[in-house]
Amino acid sequence: VKKSVDPKIKGRLTYYQSFSSIAINIGAFCGMFGFGALSQRIGRKPTFAIALVAAFVSTVTVFWTLQDLWQIFVLVPIMGFCQLSLFGGYAVYFPELFPTRLRSTGVSFCYNVGRFVAAVGPLVKLWLNEVFKETAEPLRYAGVTMCLVFLVGLVVLPFLPETQGKPLPE
């Protein structure tokens, strides 16, 4: 927030940011449980596909439409549910990919390579803000552009094995 902004407005912005954080985490909590339950019923890959599409659609919707306080309480938890349900999938899927002797290392490697790649996200956002600086609200365009990562997941998904109902590799 720029220094020229009235301190009362700064305080309200912090207040609304706090509500957004709480809302996204409530959605995330439910989404992680939901992913596990759904993946047991229909399989890991179909659940990942649904979650990736839902994450894309919900995030684009939030970035394009968020204007009013009520939307924080409705749209942001839905976005949190959809985006962060994927983490529930990692907990189920990654251990099923590796034999016992490599399971811990494999899970840690997959999870942390993802974190390493995601670490460039803030830099990409800054760059995209610069790319879209001529638009009225560059953050909205940058956020929607970054949602393309969910579609990359959909492209990769057909090449991954389905592990539901199969024994853990020894």
Image: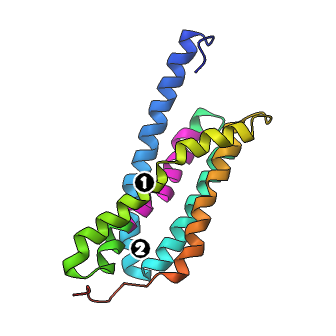
Q: Residue at x 41, y 73 (%)?
A: 38
Identify which amino acid the numbered label 2 is placed on.
Answer: Leu
Q: Which mark is residue 38?
A: 2
Q: Is residue 21 above or below residue 97?
A: above
State the SS at label 1.
helix
Residue 97 screen position, x and y as percent: 33, 79
Q: Is residue 34 above or below residue 69?
A: below
Mark 2 and mark 1 in contact (Cβ < 8 Å)? no
Residue 6 screen position, x and y as percent: 59, 10
Residue 37 position by quadrant: bottom left
Q: Which label sits in the foreground, 1 or 2? A: 1
The answer for how far apart the CA atoms under marks 1 and 2 are is: 28 Å
Magenta extent: 71-89
Q: Residue at x 54, y 10 (%)?
A: 7
Residue 140 screen position, x and y as percent: 68, 41
Is residue 108 shown to the viewer in this render?
Answer: yes
Q: Is residue 72 magenta?
A: yes
Q: Earlier in the sequence, mark 1 or mark 2?
A: 2
Is residue 2 or residue 44 the one in the foreground?
A: 2
Q: Quadrant of the C terminus?
A: bottom left
Q: Is residue 156 above or below residue 2?
A: below
Is residue 103 or residue 62 the one in the foreground?
A: 103
Q: Which residue is mark 1?
A: 116
Query: In the picture provided, is 76 more to the left or to the right than 110?
Result: right
State the SS at label 2.
helix
The residue at the far right in this view is: 134
The residue at the far left in this view is: 101
Residue 34 position by quadrant: bottom left
